[in-house]
Image: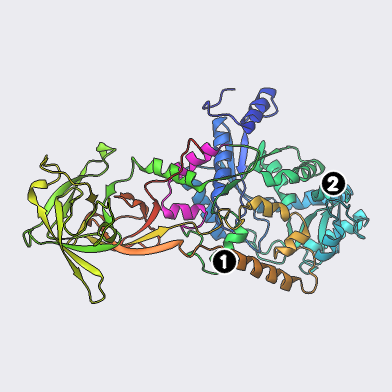
Amino acid sequence: METKAAASSNFIKNIIIDDLKSGRVSQVVTRFPPEPNGFLHIGHAKAICISFETADEFGGRTHLRFDDTNPVKEDSLFVESIKEDVEWLGFQWEALYYASEYFEEMYQRAQLLIRKGKAFVCDLSAEQIRATRGSFTEPGKDSPYRNRSVEENLELFAAMREGKFPDGAKVLRAKIDMASPNINLRDPVLYRITHASHHQTGDKWCIYPMYAFAHPLEDAIEGITHSLCSAEFEDQRPLYDWVVRECEMPHQPHQYEFARLNLTHAVTSKRKLKPLVDEQIVDGWDDPRLSTIAGYRRKGYTSESIRAFVREIGVAKSNSTVDARMLEHFVRDDLKMKAPRTMAVLRPLKVVITNYPEGQVEMLKAENNSENPEMGEREIPFSREIYIEQDDFMENPPSKYFRLFPGNEVRLKNAYFIKCNDVVKDAAGHVVELHCTYDPETKSGSGFTGRKVKGTIHWTDAGSAVPAEFRLYEALFLDENGSAGTEDEAVEAAAAADASSESAAGVPGAAEEPGEPQRRDQEAAKALKELKAQINPASLEVLHGYVEPQLGNVQPHEKFQFFRHGYFNVDPKYSTAGKPVFNRIVALKSSFDLKQG
């Protein structure tokens, strides 16, 4: 079979080619299966691109499925945000599913395991399950309830469903091997009791399947051929295969793992992102400093740049950390031909051109993008009073300073030469205004060759400029590794396979011992304190300045290159007509070299 594109190969594509040739599969079916318990992050963007683009390349299809098996932490708000993120990235799912649609079949498959002697109802508490689980060097110990009869297990499991027991009183566990070297196979929990309303099924259920049980069944039910996931699931694969086999699923999907995306200065764990949002350390899940897809979108990243970035890092088996500047490289590359170029003054200093006629305003022509002539020209007003950047003036400059200082002459971009003659200061000695003169013979585009100046600075016309807010973002975390926060959601999902991990995460699992909630709260408080210690206090700088008058009614997500400042995006949350707010996407230049990686 020929693929749609002879794109660069990887181990997943090689597997698919072999599967198609051998006839194991006739059509490739992948899925993206997020849990709707938070907003997606940049690691999910990689998983989305891999699943959708791989299927598309081989003429297959991709499902979007919500793994909504934990009503305590899930919400329809997150469902809608995930849909928006996937569509914004440029993908459209073939079909939309919810794990909760399969709850009845999952229950029946669990009954099948009980009848086969492969599952039992256990009364051990979370602490007891943890204590008997064993370690990497020691086997676990059988539960005293492991040898309950089939009849008793079926009766108890039905009673669990009927709501006859409180949260955590009992769990259903698989009966596999407590001495297995793979701890995931030591009688993992398959079902727990949770009396909570579900965003899809309401109060119909009070028992919910664990992720490690539900996920392989969902893949099998939907006919997924290649279940693509991040590397943390590798140790879970034997359990995945066990569930599919022992539940006697007609279709048997295969799981393949790729390296997760770790990005410098970024946290890609919803467990760590959530307290930042809850504690209002950041401005919601779409804060431009977060590694969420919504955050990147609000900051101004384009979907094209993220997809190009994911393709560049490729699909491999070994985990590594990618320099965040690589992602910045791709958004610069995408915007350089798209974004109109204009002038904005972020830290304004007023300039009065004393020899320019009072009351006169002339319109000057300027290119919208010098690298893309098709974007045409615009007119900008020029008059006696303008604003320049404070950084473009120094009263006592060092050598080789070519911008404005007393007695020096510079070019105003797209306008004239001006020369600084006088400096006006306030009572505290701060420079508040400059008095300059201009040379009318030096108009930009006039062909003037009489003399040259070494400095060119940007400006806005004081009479017509629009006040604007500018938000300059830096890394949220001081630690290059994101406060050791490269943990992917797959780690958490895999950890959720047993009741002790669920209990520690605050999700009802087996019954909690006295003091367990307090211990959990203490651990959460400690983790939050450590996270706060790594917050960069200079991660956001808010400035108030001016933009050219045509930017007074910009629309959300319009993007511009501000001369010398970088690329900016109109903030969709706070920008209003006549009062624009711009988020800096990225500076104009970086020391990062894509060729050197």
Residue 181 has which mark? 2
Q: Position of residue 83 (x, y in %)?
A: 52, 51
Please provide the residue range marked out in magenta: 288-314
Q: Nearer the viewer, residue 162 or 213?
A: 213
Q: Position of residue 581 (x, y in %)?
A: 34, 60
Q: Position of residue 106 (x, y in %)?
A: 74, 50
Q: How is the image coloured?
A: rainbow
Q: Main secondary structure of the magenta part?
A: helix
Q: Is residue 218 visible?
A: no
* Residue position for label 1: 532
**Residue 499 colored magenta?**
no
**Three-letter amino acid code at disc 2?**
Pro
Residue 151 has which mark? none
Compared with 541, 587 (above or below) is above
The quadrant holding residue 514 is bottom right
The secondary element bearing badge 2 is classed as: loop
Q: Is residue 272 left or right of residue 350?
A: right
Compared with 125, 291 (above or below) is above
